[in-house]
Image (tube, rainbow, N blue to C red):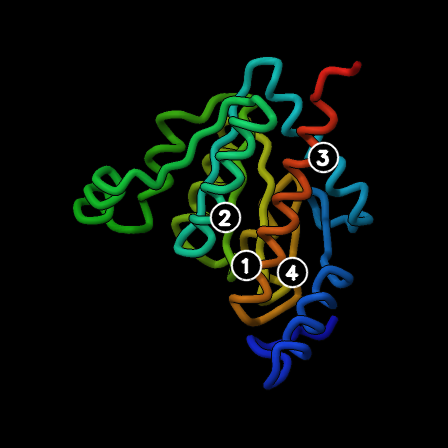
């Protein structure tokens, strides 16, 4: 599938048209790379989230803009859906780990401390190649967590190969990938909220 660049055109209309096309081209795969329809993929993601009401928790990780997306999903999971969730964006710990042990450890160490069997790791990386994200996803799987990945750029990126559910945006520009991740993350949490709301 053809990837779009950072800017699809020189005006807002063409840029937004390119973004709209992204939502038609999102690819979802299960573990092992089997393709899933978007509706089924998001439904499975919602099932993973709602399973946490039985006692698990969500761990969310990302760098830069992806960290902001992870924080937004964390907020919605806790407040709107009512499941336990945590992010590892606390600056002093992040800087201590990066300074003393290297930036590749900043999520691996917290996942090692906090992840438990049947938890859910949500890993967000535009490139899918961030070493700290990949290492944390591998460790979460080893500890028996389910893993949902959000990635973009190359279809062969490493993160896309690691999840129980993998959401991939076939774009090469951060703007399109991040905005599509943000909307799909909101889609997941909004549907989870609706499914978990008490029935009248």
Residue at 58% x, 59% y is: 179
Going from the N terminus, do you reach mark 1 or mark 3 first? 1
Going from the N terminus, do you reach mark 1 or mark 4 first? 4
> For residue 178, which numbered disc appears in the image?
1
Q: Which residue is the site of mark 3?
A: 191
Going from the N terminus, do you reach mark 3 or mark 2 first? 2
- Cβ–Cβ below 8 Å for labels 2 and 1? yes
Query: Where residue 15 sits in the image (x, y, percent)?
Result: 63, 75
Quadrant assignment for the N terminus: bottom right
- Between circles 4 and 2, the one closer to the viewer is 2
- Between circles 1 and 3, the one closer to the viewer is 3
Q: In the rendered view, does 89 fall on the left or right side of 11? A: left
Find the distance from the CA under tag 4 to the CA under tag 2.
Answer: 15 Å
Total of numbered circles in the picture?
4
Q: Secondary structure at mark 3?
A: helix
Residue at 41% x, 36% y is: 87
Residue found at the very far front of the displayed protein: 200
- Between circles 1 and 4, the one closer to the viewer is 1
Find the distance from the CA under tag 3 to the CA under tag 2.
Answer: 17 Å
Location of residue 54 by image quarter: top right
Going from the N terminus, do you reach mark 4 or mark 2 first? 2
């Amino acid at each position: 599938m053809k990837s779009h660049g950072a800017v699809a055109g020189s005006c807002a209309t063409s840029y937004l048209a390119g973004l709209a096309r992204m939502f038609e081209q999102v690819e979802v795969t299960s573990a092992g790379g089997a393709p899933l329809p978007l509706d089924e993929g998001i439904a499975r993601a919602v099932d993973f989230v709602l399973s946490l009401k039985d006692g698990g928790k969500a761990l969310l990780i990302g760098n830069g803009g992806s960290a902001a997306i992870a924080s937004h999903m964390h907020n919605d999971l806790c407040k709107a859906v009512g499941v336990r969730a945590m992010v590892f964006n606390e600056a002093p710990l992040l800087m201590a780990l990066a300074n003393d042990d290297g930036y590749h450890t900043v999520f691996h160490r917290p996942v090692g401390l906090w992840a438990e069997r049947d938890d859910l790791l949500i890993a967000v990386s535009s490139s899918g190649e961030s070493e700290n994200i990949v290492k944390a996803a591998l460790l979460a799987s080893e500890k028996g967590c389910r893993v949902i990945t959000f990635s973009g750029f190359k279809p062969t990126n490493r993160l896309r190969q690691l999840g129980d559910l993998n959401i991939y945006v076939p774009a090469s520009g951060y703007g399109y990938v991040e905005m599509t991740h943000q909307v799909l993350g909101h889609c997941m949490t909004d549907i989870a909220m609706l499914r978990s709301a008490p029935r009248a």
